[in-house]
Image (spheres, rainbow, N blue to C red):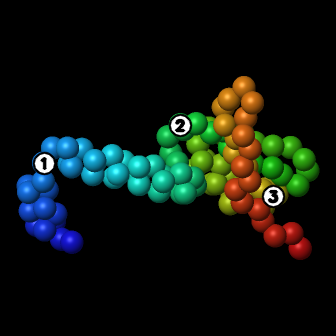
Amino acid sequence: MNQEQILEYISNINATDLEAIKKMIEGRETELYDDAWWTHDKLDEYLYKVHYQDGHTHITCKGADSYREYMRNDDAVWIERYTKDLFPTYEFLLRKEQA
């Protein structure tokens, strides 16, 4: 659909349907944002941890910062993220192949 078609469609629906569409769009934006964690330049509900070959780690609050550190540093091995809860949920994100 082009912009004119979208505007025509929106002008022909009622407020209830428009609100439902708005919620669907917001849900889709959330899904896309969560899938692209490496683009997160703002604080979100996760902490990101970069692990290095020598065993030490680097923790950041933004996915984009952790991804840049992971790509820039040859000693970085893998990235995980975890929630900022009392009992955090961990999620593996990315790992470099080792020769």
Residue found 89% across the figure and 73% down from its top: 99
Which of 67/17 is in front? 17
Q: Compared to 14, does 5 lie above or below?
A: below
Q: In the rendered image, which residue does mark 3 sit on?
A: 77
- Residue 31 shown left or right of residue 71 in the figure: left
Residue found 16% across the figure and 63% down from its top: 6
Q: In the rendered image, which residue does mark 1 sit on?
A: 14
Residue found 55% across the figure and 57% down from its top: 35
**Can you give x and y, in whole percent of width and height, for residue 79 in the image?**
73, 53
**Can you give x and y, in whole percent of width and height, for residue 2 in the image?**
18, 71
Is the residue marked by circle 2 packed among few (<14), some (14-19), or many (20+) residues within 10 Å?
Answer: few
Q: In the rendered image, which residue does mark 2 sit on?
A: 43
Is the residue marked by circle 3 packed among few (<14), some (14-19), or many (20+) residues within 10 Å?
Answer: many
**Can you give x and y, in whole percent of width and height, for residue 58 in the image?**
75, 42
Q: Are marks 3 and 2 in contact (CB under 8 Å)?
A: no
- Between the C-alphas of marks 1 and 3, the distance is 53 Å
Amino acid type at image mark 3: Val
Q: Compared to 47, does 11 lie above or below?
A: below
Mark number displayed over residue 50: none
Is any part of residue 49 visible from this angle?
no
Is the residue marked by circle 1 packed among few (<14), some (14-19), or many (20+) residues within 10 Å?
Answer: few
Q: Secondary structure at mark 1?
A: loop
Mark whose residue sits in front, 1 or 2:
1
Q: Secondary structure at mark 3?
A: strand
